Structure formats: structure tokens, C-alpha cells
Image (cartoon, rainbow, N blue to C red):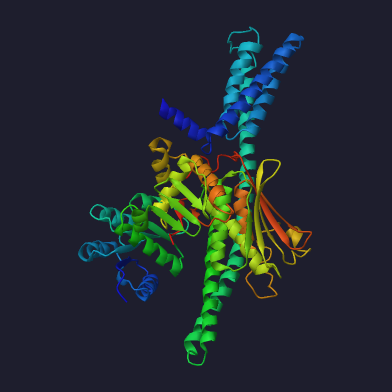
């Protein structure tokens, strides 16, 4: 099996980093492991991995420091591992340049999905390859046509308004990745509307009523409570 | 000047008051003084003698000291009364004259009344604080008992299952090994939830952590709770949300946890349940109701009325089927919903099965400034 990429695991707990390594190796990735922030810093510059899995709670320094110093010289994808209770931590890690996060305790399928998405997005900056090639995003019954500014659901036009389309289009470009409330609001309504979550929720509720069969059981756009929204991955 | 004021405040107010409390206490003080002044003016008009005036003001001072926090307002009322009575209600009217016979006595009496009543009030308040403290201690002891039971059981199972696999690796069939490993995984997952619930209960009941309330779309939280539930369970869930978007002020993580607990509860406890229905609706009195229903055999009539009464009522009872008790899960739900100013109830459905609901206020309730201004910026 060809190596899909080199992943650096920065995690101080042996049991967890061992389990992550096994999952990665079983799925064709090459895994490197370090347990401290200092080692992480030196490994990052000497090995240039394709992706970093970064636990924020490290023994010698705050994981956020590792992230910030990495972002000064590299755009390599970073998936942050965080504890469940703190959404603020996740948001600030995303703001500081993390590509995605995963919450402890996590399953292997979730972990692999995050890694796949993060690696794919760096290879084609700002969107997936298929969108760049065909200007279309397809996931199950959902089609976003970037040329015609239309969203189709099971072949029918979903009749989204302009802002609704912008939202869906943005989520589609970063499918599989969580986009924070702040980021979405800034991108769609500009910086002046920052912190007005209500406008975003209302638009999202309307979108759900147009594209989901049951807005209470969404198939396409999921909520990451306290953080933002995530579109399912393309077919 | 500022320092003097701060010193005075610290000396007179036993604990820092929030702005709302200061406004309330100041309001009480001024209202009582105004009422006393009006009463005296009235007495004056009908020609009563001035002798009743000090008594009326002593009463006002007493009531002020009783219904406000700390000594400050009582003393403030005293000083205001002393000057007010002297100025307005004793001869010569509308000028100060402190050389009147007996006037120092009136003053001293008022000060004494205000101090003594203030002290008594403080004592009563301290007593109730001690009582609340004792109740919390009792709750903590109950929690510890439940926790040690609920922790030991799955841990014993985990150690047991994994030991069997390790020690009898060759004797077990692949199927048996798989089953034991699944058992370990399920028990560990149960422990994760248990820990979350314990954290929520202690965090909320200690009052150490404020709720991070912000307006959230009820449907999104329900959808997320169901999404997580489906990762670990196969029981089908149907979700019903209203057409209108309901924005509810809440700590989203905690409400998601409540919904998760209630669905989990169905899987573990509802006998013969085959499906769950989660619905959100708006009640007539402006609350948002979340309901989790199942089609099982319902809740026993004996348990139903006291399901939410006591904290941890079922933890000590041995479960007939040997599965984990839901005592802590339900307690966590109760604590979370209560902290949101909501309430919870359970009933059996006419068509069979149980329905557990909780209602949250749509508008932000002002419960002593809790969780305000803590909007989460995503």
C-alpha cells in the first residue's frame, strides 16, 4: 500500500498516542510520535509532516503555543485534540489556524475522516479538487452548482436566497471541515455583523427547511454545538 | 474620598452586592422613609401631636434593617430619619435644632434599633446559609455513594472481561473474544457519560461554574444530540421540530447532555421499547418543551410520582436486570434544567410507553444575574 502521508502525533499520553498510531498505520499513513511541545517544535521543522495531530494539554507547554509558532512559517494541516467541556478552547484553536478539531473521547472513523479532510484541503487550497474542476459539489442528493449559483436537492432547485446560497457554497467548499460561526458571519455579512449569531441561525434554519427532509435530522449540514457548522463530505 | 467610601462600604456591607441588589435595597430604604414621612405629614394635618413621629420613623428604620442586606441601609435610614425628623417634624419646623430635650435619646434609640435589627437579620441569613450548606453536604454524600456504586460496577466488568480475554486467549473462540471486547467498549462508553454527568452535577450544584447561556436554535441542539446518540445505539429515533425557529437561551452543551441522557435512559430502562421520539414544541405560556417518548412498558406507577423528587433515589436499589442505574443521569438532567430556570416531568402515555419532558423559558429569566452577559462567541 502506498503511504498516504506522514502524520506527527503530539500527545503525552502513551495509550492514546499508541492507539492513534495503530489506526494510522493500519490505514496506510506513516506515524511519528512525540510527547512534548519542545520535541514537537523540532520534529515539525526537521520532518515536515503532512499533518499534525496536536493535543492541547502538553506537559511542558500549552499546545496553542506549538500551533501559533507553527503557523508563523507553515500552513501544514493541524487537527487539534481537545477535551469535551471547552468549546471556547476549540474556537480559539480554530481561530489560531487549526484546520479542525476532534473531541476526546473519539472513535477511529471520526479521526480518519478529520485527517482525510484536512490533508485534502491543503492539497487544493480553498476548496476541493472536484469543485475546481467541474464547479460542482455533489453529496448524496445535494448538488451545489457554483457556476449558476444554484443548489439542487434530488434534482429540484432548492430556491435559496443569495445569502443562503453563499452560506451553503462556503460550507461546500470546505466540506467535512467545521467552519466557526464567526468565520461564516464575517464571510457572508462582513465584519460589522460579527457576534450577531441570530442572523446566522435564522438563515441556517431556513436553509434546512429547504434542503433537508427533516430539519431535526439533518443529512447535509451538521451543527457543532458552540463552535459552528460542518457540511458532509462530497461523494 | 474614593478610598474612604470603599472602606465604609466594606465595613458596612458584609459581602459585595451586585448592582441589582444595591438598587433593590436602596429602593426599599427610600420607599420606607418616604412612607414614614407621608404618614407623619398626614398625622400632622389631622392635628395629632408630634410625639408619634419618632415612633413612626423608628418603625421605618426597623423595617429597613430587616429587609435589606447588611448594616448600611439601616444606618443610612437612621441618619436620614434623625435629620428628617428634626428638620421637618419637630418644632421649630423646617430648621435644624439639636438642643431639644430628649432629642439625643431619640437618636440613640434609632441607632440602637437599627444596629440590633441589622445584627439579627444577618444572623437569620447566616443560619439559612448554614442550612443550605448542610443540604449541599448531604447531597454530596449521596452523590459519592451513587458514584462509587456506578463507577465500580462497570470498572469491575471491564477488568473482568479484559482479563478473561488475556488469560484464556487460546481457549476462547473469536466470537467470544469479540463479545468480551465489545463489553469493554460499552462499559467504557457508559463511564464517559457517567463522568460527564458527575461533572455537570457538581459544577452546577457547587455554583462554581456559571452557565454559559446564549440563544441557541433548539432544533440544532436536538439534532446534534440525536446524531451523537446514533453513533452508539441502534434504536431508531424520530425527531419532530416545529416549523418556526425557536431560539432558546441555554448552555447548549448541557441541554444536549440532558437530551442524550433521556434517550440513553430509554435504551437502558424502558422495557420492550423499540423506538424513541424526540419532539420540540412551544407551549402556550411561552416555554419551549422538549419531550423524549418511547413505546415500551412505561414507568412503574410506584416510581413515577417520586422519579424527580429525591436526588439519586434509585442508585442504591439493585437493578433487577443488573444494568447501570440511571440515578445519576436523571439527577444531572434535573440539575441542568433547574439551573436554566426550567422544570421537568414524566408521565405514561395513553398508548403505552413513557414520556419525559422538560420546559425551558423562551425569554432570558433574571435569576439573580446568573449566566448573563456570557454570550458565547463562536
Does any portion of residue B377 appear in the rendered image? no
Q: Is residue A95 above or below residue B180?
A: above
Q: Nearer the viewer, residue B107 or A68?
A: A68
Location of the N terminus of chain B by quadrant is top left
- A99 on left or right of B6: left
Q: Nearer the viewer, residue B56 or B192?
A: B192
Q: Is residue B376 above or below residue B181?
A: above
Does any portion of residue B128 appear in the rendered image? yes
Q: Quadrant of residue B325?
A: bottom right
- A29 on left or right of A143: left
Q: Please give the name of the residue rendered at 33% of the width and 52% of the height, measured from the top-left corner.
A: A126
Q: Residue A27's spot in the image, x, y percent?
A: 37, 73
Q: Nearer the viewer, residue A45 or B325?
A: A45
Q: Please give the name of the residue rendered at 54% of the width and 44% of the height, measured from the top-left corner.
A: A206
Which residue in the rendered view is the most extreme toward the left?
Answer: A46
Q: Is residue A200 above or below residue A93?
A: above
Q: Nearer the viewer, residue A133 or B156?
A: A133
Q: Residue B110's spot in the image, x, y percent?
A: 63, 25
Q: Residue A29's spot in the image, x, y percent?
A: 32, 71
Q: Quadrant of residue B202?
A: bottom right
Count of numbered marks: 0
Q: Please give the name of the residue rendered at 43% of the width and 42% of the height, measured from the top-left corner.
A: A185
- A73 on left or right of A21: left
Q: Residue A145's spot in the image, x, y percent?
A: 43, 50
Q: Quadrant of residue B317?
A: bottom right
Q: Please give the name of the residue rendered at 20% of the width and 65% of the height, measured from the top-left corner.
A: A46
Which residue in the rendered view is the most extreme toward the bottom?
Answer: B171
Amino acid at each position: 500500500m502506498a503511504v498516504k502521508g506522514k502524520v506527527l502525533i503530539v500527545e503525552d499520553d502513551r495509550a492514546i498516542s499508541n492507539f492513534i498510531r495503530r489506526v494510522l498505520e493500519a490505514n496506510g499513513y506513516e506515524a511519528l510520535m512525540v510527547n512534548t511541545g519542545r520535541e514537537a517544535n523540532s520534529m515539525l521543522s526537521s520532518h515536515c509532516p503532512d499533518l499534525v495531530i496536536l493535543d492541547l494539554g502538553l506537559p511542558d507547554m500549552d499546545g496553542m503555543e506549538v500551533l501559533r509558532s507553527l503557523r508563523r512559517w507553515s500552513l501544514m494541516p493541524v487537527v487539534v485534540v481537545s477535551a469535551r467541556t471547552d468549546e471556547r478552547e476549540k474556537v480559539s484553536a480554530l481561530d489560531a489556524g487549526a484546520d479542525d478539531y476532534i473531541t476526546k473521547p473519539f472513535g477511529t472513523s471520526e479521526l480518519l475522516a478529520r485527517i482525510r479532510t484536512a490533508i485534502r484541503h491543503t492539497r487544493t487550497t480553498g476548496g476541493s479538487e472536484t469543485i475546481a474542476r467541474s464547479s460542482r459539489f455533489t453529496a448524496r442528493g445535494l448538488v451545489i452548482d457554483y457556476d449558476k449559483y444554484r443548489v439542487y436537492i434530488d434534482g429540484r432547485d432548492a430556491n435559496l436566497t443569495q445569502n443562503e446560497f453563499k452560506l451553503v457554497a462556503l460550507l461546500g467548499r470546505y466540506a467535512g471541515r467545521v467552519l466557526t460561526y464567526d468565520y461564516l458571519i464575517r464571510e457572508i455579512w462582513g465584519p460589522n455583523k460579527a457576534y450577531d449569531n441570530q442572523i446566522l441561525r435564522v438563515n441556517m434554519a431556513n436553509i434546512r427547511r429547504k434542503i433537508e427532509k427533516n430539519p431535526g435530522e439533518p443529512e447535509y449540514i451538521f451543527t457543532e454545538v458552540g463552535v459552528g457548522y460542518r457540511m458532509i463530505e462530497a461523494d | 474620598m474614593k478610598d474612604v467610601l470603599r472602606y465604609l462600604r466594606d465595613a458596612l456591607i458584609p459581602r459585595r452586592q451586585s448592582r441589582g441588589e444595591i438598587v433593590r435595597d436602596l429602593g426599599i430604604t427610600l420607599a420606607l422613609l418616604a412612607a414614614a414621612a407621608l404618614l407623619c405629614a398626614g398625622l400632622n394635618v389631622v392635628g395629632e401631636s408630634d410625639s408619634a413621629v419618632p415612633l413612626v420613623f423608628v418603625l421605618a428604620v426597623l423595617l429597613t434593617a430587616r429587609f435589606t442586606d447588611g448594616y448600611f441601609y439601616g444606618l443610612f435610614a437612621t441618619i436620614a430619619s434623625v435629620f428628617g425628623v428634626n428638620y421637618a417634624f419637630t418644632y421649630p419646623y423646617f430648621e435644624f435644632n439639636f438642643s431639644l430635650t430628649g432629642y439625643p435619646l431619640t437618636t440613640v434609640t434609632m441607632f440602637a434599633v437599627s444596629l440590633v435589627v441589622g445584627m439579627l437579620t444577618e444572623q437569620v441569613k447566616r443560619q439559612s446559609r448554614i442550612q443550605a450548606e448542610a443540604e449541599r453536604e448531604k447531597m454530596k454524600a449521596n452523590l459519592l455513594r451513587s458514584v462509587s456504586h456506578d463507577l465500580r460496577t462497570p470498572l469491575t466488568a471491564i477488568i473482568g472481561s479484559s482479563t478473561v480475554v488475556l488469560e484464556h486467549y487460546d481457549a476462547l473462540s473469536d466470537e467470544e473474544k469479540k463479545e468480551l471486547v465489545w463489553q469493554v467498549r460499552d462499559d467504557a462508553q457508559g463511564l464517559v457519560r457517567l463522568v460527564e454527568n458527575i461533572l455537570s452535577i457538581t459544577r452546577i450544584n457547587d455554583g462554581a461554574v456559571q452557565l454559559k447561556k446564549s440563544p441557541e436554535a433548539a432544533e440544532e441542539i436536538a439534532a446534534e444530540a440525536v446524531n451523537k446518540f446514533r453513533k452508539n445505539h441502534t434504536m431508531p429515533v424520530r425527531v419532530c421540530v416545529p416549523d418556526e425557529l425557536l431560539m432558546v437561551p441555554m448552555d447548549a452543551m448541557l441541554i444536549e447532555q440532558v437530551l442524550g441522557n433521556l434517550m440513553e435512559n430509554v435504551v437502558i430502562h424502558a422495557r420492550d421499547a423499540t423506538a424513541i421520539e424526540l419532539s420540540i414544541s412551544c407551549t402556550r405560556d411561552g416555554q419551549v418543551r422538549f419531550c423524549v417518548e418511547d413505546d415500551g412498558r412505561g414507568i412503574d406507577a410506584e416510581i413515577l410520582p417520586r422519579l424527580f423528587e429525591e436526588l439519586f433515589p434509585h442508585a442504591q436499589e439493585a437493578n433487577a436486570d443488573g444494568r447501570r442505574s440511571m440515578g445519576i443521569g436523571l439527577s444531572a438532567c434535573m440539575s441542568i434544567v433547574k439551573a436554566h430556570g426550567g422544570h421537568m416531568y414524566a408521565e405514561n402515555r395513553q398508548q403505552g410507553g413513557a414520556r419525559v419532558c422538560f420546559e425551558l423559558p423562551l425569554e432570558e429569566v433574571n435569576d439573580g444575574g446568573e449566566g448573563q452577559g456570557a454570550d458565547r462567541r463562536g
